[in-house]
Amino acid sequence: MSDRSILLVHAHPDDESIGQGITMAKYVAEGVRVTLVTCTAGEEGEILIPDEQHRASGNDDTLAELRKEELSAAMRELGVTDHRFLGGFGTYRDSGMQWHDQGHAVIGENIHERAFWIADLTEAADHLVRVIREVRPQVMVTYDQFGGYGHPDHIQTHRVAMYAAALAGVPSYKLDLGEPHEIAKIYWGAMNGTKLREGLRHLRDAGEEIPFDGMDPDGPLPAFMVEEHALAAVVEGTDLVEKKMAALRAHESQISVDGPFFALSDNFGQEIWGTEYFRIAKGALGPVGPDGLETDLFAGL
């Protein structure tokens, strides 16, 4: 193992594999310590397996155990051995969501008493401060302030991660949580809007179904698709796409890799799903490649 450490903070099982499956697999292969913290067990997610419908929150309410098993399986595919739930499994619950008429997620009408959305911010952040001070990452990855598409748990994950990163470095803050540690670089995961437009056109021209309710490739972008000028870093690993797809398949109760969102195939699909982009939220950019983007999240450290 190298002395490099990266921490990823996500809301639900499967978010990590969709957003940074390549990044995690790449750094594991390089001997970097990769730590994943998942804030909820995704109890309110949809269930794609007919025989598991009884696990839904309105029935047996046992989806959390299945999602936990799927997350472990996904991490085995990526080689990640250090993955944890914020505060321990079951501390915070998926808050659920509904779709706003403007096309983004918002909080649902019924909120569980353990919903992450209503968690005490300092209490939740302290759980993460303890992890930060233990694993001492140079780099942290989480969501932007809108959580990519407005999901309340993604937004809360952003708040908790950014607050915890600030608190963890304060020399006088709760020393019972560990020795203070300053994270040098923080990134927000993003999707390259320009590349995604190309991918959507690729699907359209091939006569395939276009995801995001048939989004117009030439129209407005969803919030999680970021224009190229806002991007700071890219992690490429087209040779690791199958590992990412295997991790996604492990989340079978939530993800169908045969659906239109993952339908891109051939060399173009390899480029889309084998390339992950980031915005920088803290720290100075290191050396960049010919396209003006860092190619290593540890660049300059």
Image (cartoon, grey):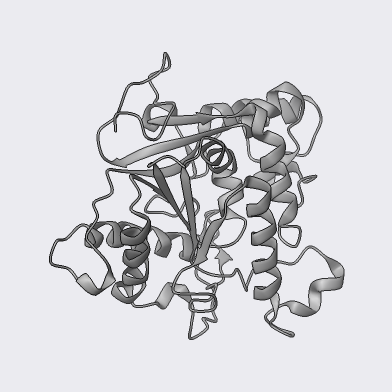
> For this view, does 1 lie left or right of residue 77?
left
Q: Nearer the viewer, residue 78 or 109?
A: 78
Q: Quadrant of residue 134?
A: bottom left
All told, the count of numbered labels is 0
Above/below status of 103 relative to 199: below
Q: Residue at x 25, y 61 (%)?
A: 168
Q: Residue at x 48, y 34 (%)?
A: 277
Q: What is the x, y in percent for residue 146?
A: 41, 54
Q: What is the x, y in percent for residue 62?
A: 70, 80
Q: What is the x, y in percent for residue 300?
A: 29, 29
Q: Residue at x 23, y 62 (%)?
A: 179
Q: Nearer the viewer, residue 30 or 248?
A: 30
Above/below status of 227 relative to 124: above
Q: Residue at x 45, y 54 (%)?
A: 147
Residue 38 seen in render = yes
Above/below status of 78 relative to 208: below
Residue 201 seen in render = no
Q: Quadrant of residue 227?
A: top left
Q: What is the x, y in percent for residue 276?
A: 53, 35
Q: Please, which residue is most extreme toward the right here?
A: 51
Q: Please, which residue is most extreme toward the front here?
A: 1
In what quadrant of the picture does the C terminus appear?
top left
